Structure formats: C-alpha cells, structure tokens
C-alpha cells in the first residue's frame, strides 16, 4: 500500500463524498485567491504534527488538519438573499445539520462523515472536532464566510532509522 499524506487522503475522501453541486472545488492548501466561480469550496490544510516514540520501535504521529468550508460572503448582500438562509447558516447546515426527531447528525454532514467514515490506514479521526465560523478578507478584496473544522489523526510510522 502506497503512503498518502493525511491532508491528501482527507481531501480525496471529501472529494469522493461530496458531489460538485455541493462544492465546486477542492483545494489542498489555501490558494489565497479563490475565483468566485469556484465557491463554495473545500480547503484542507495541515496545521502541524507532533511525533514521539510509539510501541515496538515505531513512531507515534498526531497530525492536526483544518478543513475550511468557504462561501462567497457577498451572496448575502444580494437583494434576493433570504435572511434566514445566509452563508453562515448554509455552512452550519453542511457541517452539523441534525435530524429534528433524534438530534443525530445527518449522514451527509461533514461532522458525521469525518467521525464515522474517514479512515487513514485503518485509523479514524481522534476523539474531537473543533468547529469555528468567521469572515475572511481575501487578497483580491473579496470576502468569504468560512467554517473551519480542526481534526487530529494519530497513526504509527515504522522507524526506518533502525536496522
């Protein structure tokens, strides 16, 4: 089995899980300038990692990844914008919509997909997902409404330094 970086594996998983009518583009790393015709989009970034000794001469690595859900904030300024369905709400619905009867996350939400279906070499996302919302100014002057999910994944690496 070929090695795939966790950020790449996560991006591939999201690209396979969400059709192009939900997200128009998937980026590995934030390109800074995102053309309006590519929004809404997904951006996956590696924030960093921590490595230490694991069992039996292995290395234990925990990587922190950020998934950005990016919408064009100017869509909220249109005359026909629904004040009860602005970009922040649409991001919340994609990330964490729940069944009104049970309160469970709906199957197509990012939180449920990440916790229940994403795996890297048999390992899933660690216990928690951090979710934040905000507005960002892009280098071209455009404004984006963004939802950021921060996840960690821990895995073992064979210590190739020993013989």
Image (spheres, rainbow, N blue to C red):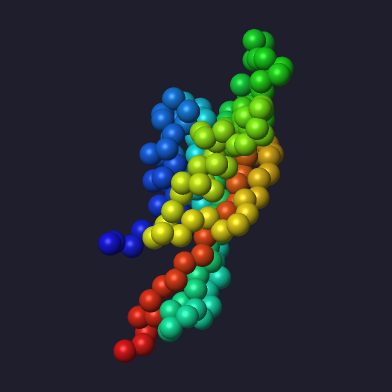
Q: Residue at x 64, y 10 (%)?
A: 80
Q: Is residue 58 left or right of residue 91?
A: left
Q: Is residue 158 left or right of residue 23?
A: left
Q: How far across and how far down the image is residue 115, in percent? A: 54, 48
- Residue found farthest to the left: 1
- Residue found farthest to the bottom: 163
- Residue found farthest to the front: 102
Q: How far across and how far down the image is residue 40, in percent? A: 52, 30
Q: Is residue 77 left or right of residue 58?
A: right
* Vertical position of residue 51 compared to residue 43: above or below: below
Q: Residue at x 57, y 33 (%)?
A: 106
**Res 104 quadrant in image:** top right
Q: Residue at x 62, y 39 (%)?
A: 147
Q: Is residue 52 left or right of residue 25?
A: right
Q: How far across and how far down the image is residue 124, in percent? A: 49, 56
* Vertical position of residue 110 compared to residue 120: above or below: above
Quadrant in which the C terminus appears:
bottom left
The answer, for residue 22, to whether it is visible in the render is yes
């Amino acid at each position: 089995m070929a090695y795939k970086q966790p950020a790449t594996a996560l991006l591939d998983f999201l690209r396979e899980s969400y059709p192009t009518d939900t997200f128009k583009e998937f980026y590995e790393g934030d390109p800074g300038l995102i053309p309006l015709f590519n929004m809404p989009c997904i951006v996956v970034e590696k924030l960093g990692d921590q490595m230490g000794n694991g069992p039996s001469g292995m290395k234990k690595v925990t990587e922190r990844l950020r998934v950005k859900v990016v919408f064009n904030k100017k869509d909220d300024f249109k005359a026909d914008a629904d004040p009860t369905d602005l970009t922040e709400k649409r991001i919340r619905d994609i990330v964490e919509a729940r069944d009104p009867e049970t309160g469970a996350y709906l199957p197509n939400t990012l939180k449920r997909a990440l916790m229940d279906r994403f795996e890297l070499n048999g390992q899933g996302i660690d216990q928690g997902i951090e979710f934040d919302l905000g507005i960002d100014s892009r280098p071209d002057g455009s404004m984006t409404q963004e939802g950021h999910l921060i996840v960690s994944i821990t895995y073992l690496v064979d210590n190739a330094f020993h013989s």
